[in-house]
């Protein structure tokens, strides 16, 4: 690769996580982690100047609809807002605004540290527990029923984190905005109008577990507080105020009349704390009282100040990444979001701006659902009832890991903290449960040698250290892969030291678990190798096979990361050498002479479902990096992995399609990767797999019944980024899998690069025209574009810009 004739541009730059300074200035100190999920905080600093985008700039990252959401279909039609802990689905009904509010920490159940007779952990709502709703908020406005309004429109502003609804009644234009403010720790609704109109109605707050709401005239608030059966206390509060009309308490509700403007503020939370030694409780927190305090504090500010404070915080995170995949047609732009989704599927015509917006929607959900609290589980912080499938839990055999593939790739490294903090908080419980129960005679996956060390997890985990369903021995290695890869992106040595006990404990678990066996190769030569004890290849095939490819790849990967971590930290060098010797003895998979596929089990026969949703044996292709289309991978292994991926098919559940897309991107098959992205954009009908009206991914659990599962909303955008930039430490490749639909012209900025860099690039006619690489801790890498390569040497904070790379 040759740079342009002019000298390469080199400029100093702040680290990619510099936005935390802005967030802290806006009162978002919890972004640094370590604080209880719902705690008292100082009033936020208000930005001195308006941070709002112009209408033209905002339009680039907006989704819009011509109809409100139905109260009976909120999971697929309600628009999501969230501040990282509190989440809500909003109906945007003109006459009866409904918000279904969730707190990420409002979980039933408990530690659940026992095994059933069949070796499984109990896995129900009463024992393992479930994420549940916090509250329902209704703002009723008589006379604004849907049949009485004209020119209805609702907009989700992805860049500013605001839902805006406008409509006309009797010639007056009414406007409401909804946002979830992290600095004020509250959900805010503002109502205004143009043309001399006013609002009259009621604000009602209700729990969903039989709570009793009370109202206080002195403070002008309505609130409730209660405790779950597991002792977790929780509460919520709401207040309303206006500068023009009357707001009063009437029974348990708030009433308003003659208001040309109205502001409603809701907050709430629990006494959950991420501290196993304290039983995951903070006894100093009175959730109801704290919620009342927070809404009253927020109500001291004007609606404009609340909005600007929120937008300053939100934009500081969102703007770390930008994307253009090309221009859509004027006819496509005329359609609302749901019409565009339907047209994209019906006409099979690329819609680059819609496809870019889908990625930004995933980033919006990450910012809204993963900051300063628990990580995103199966449904993030958005529920429409108290019985989410699989309890809305943290599945450790793909789902929680997929949720965080997007963060570092797309300028959201700070959002990864919720995942890391969760693992750190759970480690004492996971270690204790492993030591006590893993070698129980009831556990079919117990270590046959009788040894046990370190920690591992169940397939399902909850916030109380509890496990559900089967043990998942290799789950520790997969969680550690995510944790270590975050270090590869950020080169944050302090962070690596923080998560090191997790990595070392997982290594110790596998040192105790590996067993020796003899294998014979095609030439007839025999050798002793190390394999994983009895396990299940998620989630199919025999329940007790040894040496499954999934576990072998994960352990090989874990041991390699441990070596790098010990070198970086200067710790445990002797132990690291011993672990590296074990790594060199690990059995690694071969290609079946019967199927031509990479073997999923140590058998030439396929023992499972050909088109199964999981790609467990392909971990080494993605998210691992042992198998790749270059000279480092034997040709037969690469061909076997490709054949297995082909056999799995191109049409599955959303998250499974996202994983397939990422694998095809790694194989540089741009059109297959793109087709799977488009498949996930197809409109869901009658609960079928695809995107709902609000773009939530729908998972068809049975014919005619689909549920929301958020992992595809994160995994599919991660695939888009992977198509544009591939990286590993010491190597970054630009446009490795650019499909024809995006080839004409485009750009992306803020892409995380493993090894400690951030990349910006633009392209035309499928060729890179300019690229900038900034160091956030990395020093040396090789940049590849158009078949040419160039070594890049930078110091942290420095950048280089290259032009005319083809």
Image (spheres, rainbow, N blue to C red):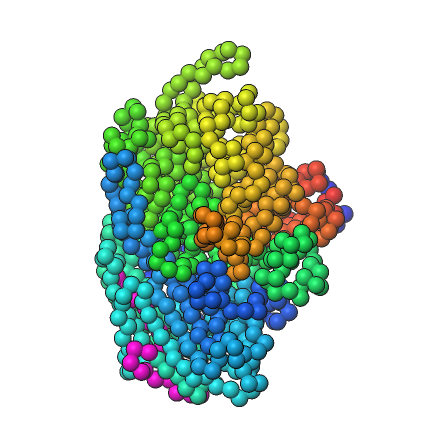
| Residue 144, horizontal then vertical, whole percent | 48, 80
Asked if 519 appears above or below 65 in the picture, the reply is: above
Foreground residue among 251 and 448: 251
Q: Is residue 188 left or right of residue 54?
A: left
Q: Is residue 1 visible?
A: yes
Foreground residue among 715 and 698: 698
The residue segment tinted magenta is 233-253
Q: Is residue 778 visible?
A: no
| Residue 58, horizontal then vertical, whole percent | 60, 67
Residue positioned 39% across, 51% down in the render: 389
- In the rendered structure, does residue 484 fall within the stretch colored magenta? no
Q: How many marks?
A: 0
Residue positioned 43% across, 28% down in the render: 548
Quarter of the view holding residue 33: bottom left
| Residue 441, horizontal then vertical, whole percent | 24, 30
- In the rendered structure, does residue 248 fall within the stretch colored magenta? yes
Locate the C terminus by quadrant.
Answer: top right
Foreground residue among 141 and 367: 141
């Amino acid at each position: 690769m040759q740079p342009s004739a002019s000298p390469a541009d080199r400029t100093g730059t702040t680290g990619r996580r510099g936005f935390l300074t802005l967030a802290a200035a806006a009162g978002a100190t919890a972004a640094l982690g370590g604080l209880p999920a719902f705690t008292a905080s100082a009033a936020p600093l208000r930005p001195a100047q308006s941070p709002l985008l112009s209408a033209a700039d905002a339009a680039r990252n907006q989704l819009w609809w011509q109809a409100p959401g139905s109260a009976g279909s909120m999971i697929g039609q309600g628009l999501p807002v969230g501040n990282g802990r509190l989440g809500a689905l909003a109906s945007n009904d003109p006459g009866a605004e409904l918000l279904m509010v969730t707190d990420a920490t409002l979980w039933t159940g408990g530690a659940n540290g026992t095994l059933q007779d069949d070796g499984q952990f109990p896995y129900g709502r009463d024992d393992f527990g479930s994420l549940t709703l916090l509250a329902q908020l209704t703002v009723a406005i008589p006379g604004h029923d849907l049949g009485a309004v004209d020119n209805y429109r609702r907009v989700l502003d992805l860049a500013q984190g605001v839902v805006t609804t406008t409509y006309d009644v009797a010639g007056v234009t009414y406007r409401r905005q909804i946002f979830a403010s992290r600095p004020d720790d509250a959900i805010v609704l503002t109502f205004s109008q143009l043309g001399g109109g006013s609002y009259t109605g009621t604000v009602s707050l209700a729990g969903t577990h039989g709570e009793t709401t009370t109202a206080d005239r002195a403070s002008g608030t309505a609130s409730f507080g209660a405790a779950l059966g597991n002792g977790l206390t929780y509460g919520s509060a709401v207040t309303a105020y206006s500068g023009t009309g009357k707001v009063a308490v009437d029974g348990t509700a708030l009433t308003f009349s003659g208001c040309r403007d109205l502001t409603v503020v809701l907050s709430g939370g629990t006494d959950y704390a991420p501290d196993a030694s304290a039983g995951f409780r903070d006894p100093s927190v009175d959730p109801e009282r704290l919620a009342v305090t927070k809404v009253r504090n927020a109500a001291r500010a004007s609606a404009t100040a609340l909005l600007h404070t929120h937008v300053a915080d939100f934009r500081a995170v969102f703007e770390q990444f930008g994307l253009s995949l090309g221009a859509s047609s004027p006819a496509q732009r005329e359609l609302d979001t749901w019409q565009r989704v339907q047209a994209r599927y019906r006409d099979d015509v690329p819609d680059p701006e819609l496809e870019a917006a889908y990625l930004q929607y995933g980033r919006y959900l990450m910012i809204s659902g993963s900051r300063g609290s628990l990580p995103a589980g199966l449904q993030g912080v958005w529920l429409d009832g108290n019985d989410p499938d699989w309890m809305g839990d943290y599945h450790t055999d793909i789902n929680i890991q997929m949720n965080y593939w997007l963060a570092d790739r797309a300028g959201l490294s700070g959002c990864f903290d919720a995942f890391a903090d969760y693992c750190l908080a759970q480690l004492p419980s996971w270690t204790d449960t492993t030591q006590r129960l893993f070698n129980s005679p009831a556990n079919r996956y117990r270590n046959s040698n009788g040894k046990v060390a370190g920690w591992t997890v169940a397939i399902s985990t909850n916030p109380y250290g509890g496990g559900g369903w089967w043990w998942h021995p290799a789950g520790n290695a997969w969680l550690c892969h995510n944790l270590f890869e975050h270090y590869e992106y950020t080169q944050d040595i302090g962070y690596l030291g923080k998560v090191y006990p997790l990595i070392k404990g997982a290594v110790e678990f596998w040192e105790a678990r590996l067993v020796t066996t003899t294998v014979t190769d095609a030439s007839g030569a025999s050798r002793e190798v190390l394999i994983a004890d009895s396990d299940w290849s998620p989630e199919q095939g025999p329940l007790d096979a040894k040496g499954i490819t999934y576990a072998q790849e994960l352990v090989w990967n874990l041991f390699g990361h441990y070596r790098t971590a010990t070198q970086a930290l200067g710790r445990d060098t002797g132990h690291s050498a011993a672990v590296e010797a074990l790594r060199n003895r690990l059995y690694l998979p071969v290609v079946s002479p019967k199927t031509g596929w990479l073997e999923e089990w140590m058998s030439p026969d396929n023992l499972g479902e050909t088109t199964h949703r999981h790609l467990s044996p392909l971990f080494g292709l993605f998210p691992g990096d042992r198998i790749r289309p270059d000279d480092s991978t034997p040709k037969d292994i690469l061909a076997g992995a490709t054949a297995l991926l082909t056999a799995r098919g191109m049409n599955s559940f959303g998250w499974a399609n996202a994983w397939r897309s990422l694998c095809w991107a790694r194989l540089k098959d741009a059109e297959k990767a793109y087709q799977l992205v488009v498949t996930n954009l197809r409109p869901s009908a009658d609960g079928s797999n695809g995107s709902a009206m609000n773009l939530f991914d729908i998972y068809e659990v049975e014919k005619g019944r689909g549920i929301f599962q958020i992992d595809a909303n994160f995994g599919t955008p991660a695939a888009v980024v992977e198509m544009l930039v591939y990286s590993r430490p010491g190597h970054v490749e630009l446009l490795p899998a650019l499909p024809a639909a995006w080839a004409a012209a485009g750009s992306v900025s803020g892409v995380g690069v493993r090894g400690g860099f951030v990349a910006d690039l633009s392209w035309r006619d499928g060729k890179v025209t300019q690229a900038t690489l900034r160091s956030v801790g990395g020093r040396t890498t090789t940049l590849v574009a158009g078949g040419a390569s160039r070594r890049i040497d930078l110091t942290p904070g420095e950048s280089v810009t290259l032009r005319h790379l083809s």
